[in-house]
Image (cartoon, grey):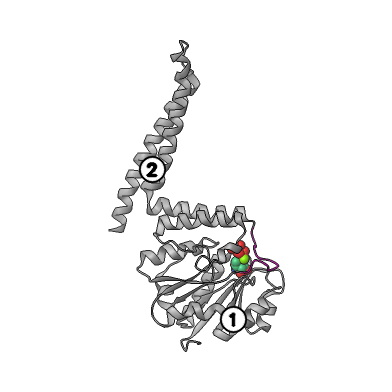
Amino acid sequence: MVSSMKTLIIIPAYNEELTIGSVVTLAKKYGDVLVVDDGSADRTSEIARNAGAFVIKHETNMGKGAALRTGFEYALSMDYKIVVTLDADGQHNPDEIPVLLEPIVNGKADLVIGSRYLNGAQRSIPPYRRFGLWILNLGTKVVSNMNVDSQSGFRAMNKKLLEKLDLNSNDYSIETDMIVKARERGIRLMEVPITVRYDVPNKHKKNPVSHGLGVLASIVGLIGYKRPLLLFGVLSLLSFITSGVLAYWALKPYYHGGRIFLTQAIGAGIFAIIGIQLFVAGLTLNVLAKMVRE
Ligand SMILES: Nc1nc2c(ncn2[C@@H]2O[C@H](COP(=O)(O)OP(=O)(O)O)[C@@H](O)[C@H]2O)c(=O)[nH]1
Ligand SMILES: [Mg+2]
């Protein structure tokens, strides 16, 4: 089944000369292919072009999110009805594109996410990555109420979604950004099972710690924006707990007939004040966030 609707397959690529050729060749069966070469220093552009892709090249490396946004702009300007995004490193299987297209073509969803959690494919994810993903998925759930494979870059979407979302992330946080904004704007979201390969030569461009922390920072930012009372409430609670521990420490000698530890007592006071301020900030921002939403 190949849809008759004009489909663009967008592949963000950064130094992927080893895999881009085969990914483009396989993807071509399902639509036009656009490779956004994000300032690669290798032959990604040349190979992609020879394999039959249209190539847009960023002069410098701007990040996966920026590359996808370049692709989305191109899709809108050329009036594509459907867009598929997939990774250039060979981790995704282009022959699964029809599975992602089906709900879009049949009008059942506006955004389809390829999920590693629906068919047990998550078992092939290395454990430390699985833990990181668990945290990012949880964070995404807190902001969007959607329990999905939030970091998967294998997705299909229709034109309506592209027109409605003004994405502004430049890095990997674009994946969460898209889910959160889709949810806000009443977009129908669905997941389908996909497989992911971990035996490819260049599967991760960034080290997992900075990659994960970068995405996490943006999710925490979103939590502060969407659910300020939760974020500030947790921080405030942590301050009060710290204050309690210090107070206990300060007062302990006093009950044994000695004098209180002054340093710990001052610390306890400071953390109590911080706790109160965080709580008040949370309440205030919560009211503001409500006002903005109404
Ligand atoms: N355009 C662009 N693509 C990137 C960049 N970093 C990674 N990618 C692409 O985004 C996809 C996923 O990146 P990858 O590092 O494999 O993510 P991971 O598998 O989740 O660790 C791949 O196709 C990369 O080529 C970047 O800075 N710019
Ligand atoms: Mg990868």
Mark 1 within 8 Å of ligand 1, using the beta carbon: no
Question: What residue appears at the point 45 percent right and 22 percent down from the top-left corner?
Answer: 265
* Residue stretch rendered in magenta on the structure: 197-206
Question: What residue appears at the point 64 percent right and 59 percent down from the top-left corner?
Answer: 206
Q: Quadrant of the C terminus?
A: bottom left
Tag of residue 238: none
Q: Which residue is mark 2?
A: 233
Q: Earlier in the sequence, mark 1 or mark 2?
A: 1
From the viewer's side, name the closer residue of 293 and 85: 85
Q: Looking at the picture, how far across and down is residue 279, in whole percent? A: 36, 39
Q: Residues within 10 Å of mark 2 (few under 14, many from 20)?
A: many
Extreme-top residue of the structure? 257
* Quadrant of the image occupied by residue 239: top left
Q: Is residue 62 visible?
A: no
Question: What residue appears at the point 46 percent right and 54 percent down from the top-left corner?
Answer: 139
Q: Looking at the picture, how far across and down is residue 188, in whole percent? A: 38, 71
Mark 2 within 8 Å of ligand 1, using the beta carbon: no
Q: Looking at the picture, how far across and down is residue 25, in whole percent? A: 64, 83
Badge 2 amino acid: Gly
Question: What residue appears at the point 46 percent right and 81 percent down from the top-left corner?
Answer: 102
Q: Which residue is mark 1?
A: 27
